[in-house]
Image (cartoon, rainbow, N blue to C red):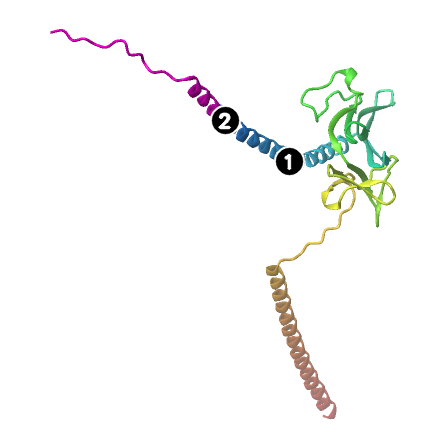
Amino acid sequence: MKKVFNISGKLRAFTLAEVLAALTIGAMVLVAVMGVYSRAERSAAAITRKLESSQLPFEILQAIAEDIDRAVGSGADAKVTIDNKFINSLPTARLVIQTTINDRRDEEQTFEKIIWQTNYDRNTDSLVLYRSHSGIALEDKLLDEQKESWERELFVPVCTGVTFFKIQVPASADFQDSWRGNSLPNGITVTISFAEPFKKRNGTWDVPEEEKIVRSIAINRIRKIKFNIVKSQYEEDKTDKDEDEEQVEEESRGGQGENQDDESGETEGEEGSDEEDRVEE
């Protein structure tokens, strides 16, 4: 007896509606995942920018301090020139660090000249910080790769978005906004900020004091510095103890001196009485 199989039945497949529904759900899941990833990427970028913006002012101030230290400690004659002014009501500054040497003909040559200055940028409505390096010293310590000879006189942009830049010389009671001459100041104060500025009554722009990054840099290293050494509590107690012991010793020495004086007085009195007895005899 033969078995007969029904081969007329067809295999069931996905309908067009099911395929469209699956594609729609997949697209929705993909869009949701991409949205989460995009938000996470933006958050990470914002944190990175914030960290970089907070570190950038300190890096700039450190670079200026290193340029000054190299110029002053190089052994050559160093000179510092400082100027402050307003450009489009924004505070700007210019710092020139120049060292000179004498050649074989005893003629003065510029060994190294470094300029830090800010200029106004119309595109960003802020200041751009520039730095230039020139002189017969070809090596620039700040750069990893040295510039060509024709590039030494060019100003290299360091950063943009600066809203406050000022360089001053501390005086006895106030600050000086300019410094010229062959003598070096004892130090300078550099202030920089990238914060949102506000307009003052006189028409100039300023930033809040808490948003200003300030650093004082020493220049004249041969100046006399007065140090006040604060004693610890242990040293103060030890000093008081030593003073008490010295006082006790002095008192004991004074007592011994008085006893010796009394004894010497008694001896003198006895010798005087003996002499009187001899005279009577």
Question: Which label is found at residue 28?
Answer: 2
* Residue, far bottom: 280
Give the crowd class for mark 2: few <14, some 14-19, many >=20 residues within 10 Å: few
* Magenta stretch encompasses residue 124: no
Q: Closer to us: mark 2 or mark 1?
A: 2
Quadrant of image for the C terminus: bottom right
- First along the sequence among labels 2 and 1: 2
Q: Nearer the viewer, residue 245 or 157?
A: 157
Q: Residue at x 76, y 47 (%)?
A: 225
Q: What span is in magenta?
A: 1-26
Q: Position of residue 112 (x, y in %)?
A: 79, 25
Q: Is residue 136 above or below residue 275?
A: above
* Magenta stretch encompasses residue 5: yes
Q: Residue at x 32, y 13 (%)?
A: 11
Tally of numbered tags:
2
> Horizontally, is 196 left or right of 247 in the view?
right
Q: Residue at x 55, y 29 (%)?
A: 35
Q: Is residue 159 above or below residue 190?
A: above
Q: Amino acid at mark 1?
A: Lys
SS state under label 1: helix
Q: Nearer the viewer, residue 175 or 3?
A: 3
Choose top left, top right, bottom left or bottom right for residue 228: bottom right
Q: Are marks 2 and 1 in contact (CB under 8 Å)?
A: no
Choose top left, top right, bottom left or bottom right for residue 210: top right
Q: Amino acid at mark 2?
A: Met
* Residue, far left: 1
The reply to whether residue 73 is in sight is no
Question: Which label is found at residue 145?
Answer: none
Give the crowd class for mark 1: few <14, some 14-19, many >=20 residues within 10 Å: few
- Pointer 1 residue: 50
Q: Residue at x 62, y 58 (%)?
A: 232
Quadrant of image for the N terminus: top left
